[in-house]
Image (cartoon, helix red, strand yellow):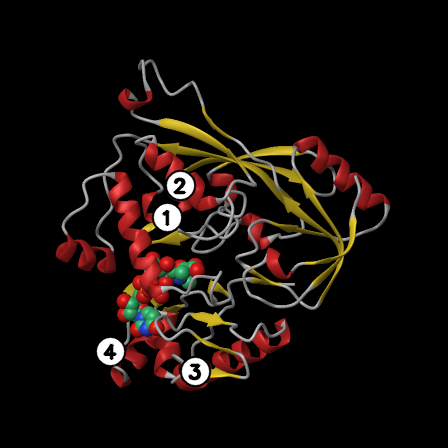
Amino acid sequence: MEFIVNQDLSSLHTMGCRSTAQSFVVVYSLPELKSTLEEARQRALPITVLGGGSNVVFSEHVPGLVVKMGILGIEVLENFGSEASVEDAEVVWVKAQAGENWHHFVRWTLQQGLGGLENLSLIPGTVGAAPIQNIGAYGVEVKDVISEVSAINRNTGELKIFDRDECGFRYRDSIFKRDPGKWIIVEVTFRLSPKAPLKLDYAELKKFWESAGEPSSYLEVGALVEEIRRRKLPDPDVVPNSGSFFKNPTVDDQLYQRILDEYPSVVAFPSGVNQWKLAAGWLIQECGWKGFVDDGVGVFDRQALVIINPGYRPAAAIKGLASKIQQSVADKFGVELEIEPFIL
Ligand code: EPU
């Protein structure tokens, strides 16, 4: 495989930071990926795998080899049951390759009349990246509909198929995120259904359809989710950002009660026994950051969880602002905010 030297990565990730990779290659098939890994091993090049670049903040110089996943393909598996057609089936398994654009894939499934992914419409990124941080929105997490993930071990080249339990999914987390140097996801199998119930309970979704009319198909739910996201979240092609920059933190009952006493408007949801998930956007907003912009970096004015980079500043500037936000939330509420994207 030919590696490109000093590849500019600016347009390959959404945070807008100027960045160059020591070496770069796009792989379009499993054999290409395997031979790339072998060559990188021989040349002792550390590897960074890149999907859609929507959850990564690149430093100015990325050492080693950046591998962009370009493996494409979507396939409806034939073993969906004894039914004659997809429409009659209870469950339909669909396999998608890692390089497929996430939103295009979601739209394709909705157009086939398959439910399960509609609430996850318009999330930037690729199919292969979706399981890594167990993407979630509007009451659905991708783990809910994943049946298998196939991944290559970076060190041995071995292909392993993980069933859903083996993926160790948690909120914005999986074994692929907890051990980022080990696996490269190459394909994901989803368990979809033409009979899956619509999931319309998420407060914001409900607010929208109560005024706009209740959606009655997967495509309509997808369109509604797209509309909400377009209104609330910045388009990375217009204002560089990587979506939620922090995870919603979980705190124990004691800390939650202390915060509630002092700030009765705190936004929180029960999350397991004696645990509460706090809306990080609310915590950041209460610290006065919403709409703040200084020296080209800032906090989106409609969703305080999103750091924006309109000045195309380097990763250090993003990290600097993120640290100040974390510090102010810790000082005011005693809550630690965890950064969500990979910072490389
Ligand atoms: N809120 C504020 N101020 C803000 C933002 C939020 O007060 O600036 C409060 C509001 O009360 C709002 C509540 O927080 O009702 C929840 O806000 P939202 O519905 O926007 O959800 P979120 O918890 O802030 C999460 C995901 C988003 C996803 C939305 C919708 C995380 C880290 N983020 O945000 O994911 O779109 O739910 O389900 O869990 C992403 O990952 O890039 C992303 C956008």
Residue at 70%, 68% (x, y): give it.
Answer: 60
- For marks 1 and 3, give the CA distance: 28 Å
Residue 301 in the figure: left or right of residue 308: left
For this rendering, which residue is in front, 245 or 267? 245
Q: Image quadrant of residue 301?
A: bottom left
Residue indicated by mark 1? 121
Q: CA distance from mark 2 to mark 1?
A: 6 Å
Q: Is residue 310 left or right of residue 231?
A: right
Q: Is residue 328 left or right of residue 67?
A: left
Q: In the image shown, does 38 or 99 lie closer to the viewer?
A: 99
Number of residues whose C-alpha sits closer than 10 Å to that of mark 2, classed few (under 14), some (14–19) or many (20 or more): many
The quarter of the picture where the C terminus appears is bottom right
x, y percent for residue 9: 66, 59
Q: Is residue 268 visible?
A: no
Image quadrant occupied by the N terminus: top right
Q: Amino acid at mark 1?
A: Ser
Q: Residue furthest front?
A: 238
Judge whether 57 appears above or below 86 on screen.
Answer: below
The type of residue carrying mark 2 is Val
The residue that mark 3 highlights is 292
Among the two numbered marks 3 and 2 on one chain, the one whose residue lies closer to the N terminus: 2
Identify the residue under disc 2.
Answer: 106
Would residue 155 be seen by someone viewing this image from the given angle? yes
| Residue named by callout 4 | 265
Alpha-carbon distance for marks 1 and 4? 30 Å
Q: Earlier in the sequence, mark 1 or mark 4?
A: 1
